[in-house]
Image (tube, grey):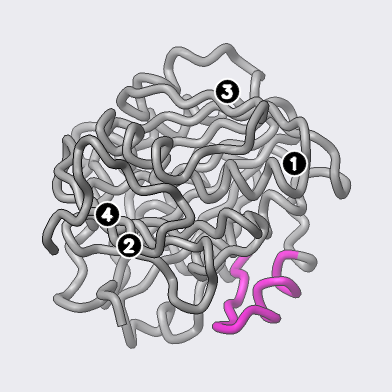
Amino acid sequence: MSDHSHPDEPDSPADPIPVSRSVDLGRAALLPDVDRPRAWLLTLDGSPQSYVDLDEPEYVEFEYARRLAHVLDLAAGPGRPLDVLHLGGGALTLPRYVEATRPGSRQHVAELDAALVALVTEHLPLPSGAPIDVEVGDARAVLAAQPAASADALVADVFGGALIPRHLTSIGFLADAARVLRPGGVYAANLADGGALVFLRGQTATALAVFAHVALVAEPEHLDGTRFANAVLVASDAPLPSDALAALAAADPYPAVVLTGPELTAFAAGHPVVTDTTAIGSPAPPRGAFGIG
């Protein structure tokens, strides 16, 4: 895509003109949605990353992001502010969602790509005065620097292009996530896999080794290996609202199911816990799996 912006004439968020710019980790583009006047799709090297509607931040387009939003909706009573740590920023879809649905929530975002942060905050500014702090840094390093028992919710949505970095898949990473969560706090991760789901099964086994309660939200066609897709792994030291989560996921445009208990244990059976030594990161999606249709 050609660069439609001029360095001396930045586009305003209302301009329905695509913006394309080289960032630290590739080529980013902001593409306007012709059906929603101030909605934008962020892509990185052609792979969809985030969708934001500046007029309606509680609208969540991507199915995996909707499932993460369901987890956040159930993390506390309606409207109650939360302390949320977001690993992975993109276009800051979920921080905007939390601010819209739980005003006053304190949110800290880690995003590795400084140029991407600059692009997003320039063209898709955050709500004025919202307590959302964006830190440029590696997700695991930012996590390690957080105080113990400092977050009500932790969302991991980190992709280097279309791949999840290997150092964000190990038991050491998950143990640090558990350390940062308050008692009863919830961890939610966006994961991607296909085929025999070896990566997803290994991530589930690793979460089961760290957290007392784990659930997996995925579409049936994903779980049976029919297609490569995203799934959301949810974990906590306290019982999860699995029935409520299943009801929300089933009502989505692309319905998902929730695996828990013996069913989830069987899903992960025979797959070893992932360590920093054995971690390989997520598999590459097949060509066109996450293309712009």
Q: Residue furthest front?
A: 9
Secondary element under disc 1, as helix, strand or loop, is: loop
Start-end of magenta stretch: 245-260
- Nearer to us in this view, 194 or 85: 85
Is the Cβ of the residue at disc 1 closer than 8 Å to that at disc 4?
no
The stretch drawn in magenta includes residue 198? no
Three-letter code, disc 4? Val
Query: Is 200 situated left or right of 258 in this image?
Result: left
Is the Cβ of the residue at disc 2 closer than 8 Å to that at disc 4?
yes
Q: Is residue 217 above or below residue 127?
A: below
Is the Cβ of the residue at disc 1 closer than 8 Å to that at disc 2?
no
Query: Is 174 situated left or right of 248 in this image?
Result: left
Q: Nearer the viewer, mark 1 or mark 4?
A: 4
The circle drawn on residue 19 is 4
Three-letter code, disc 1? Ala
The residue under label 3 is 180
The circle drawn on residue 51 is none
Q: Residue at x 51, y 36 (%)?
A: 86
Q: Nearer the viewer, mark 1 or mark 2?
A: 2
Quadrant where the N terminus lies? bottom left
Q: Quadrant of residue 184?
A: top right
Q: Is residue 206 above or below residue 85?
A: below
The stretch drawn in magenta includes residue 259? yes
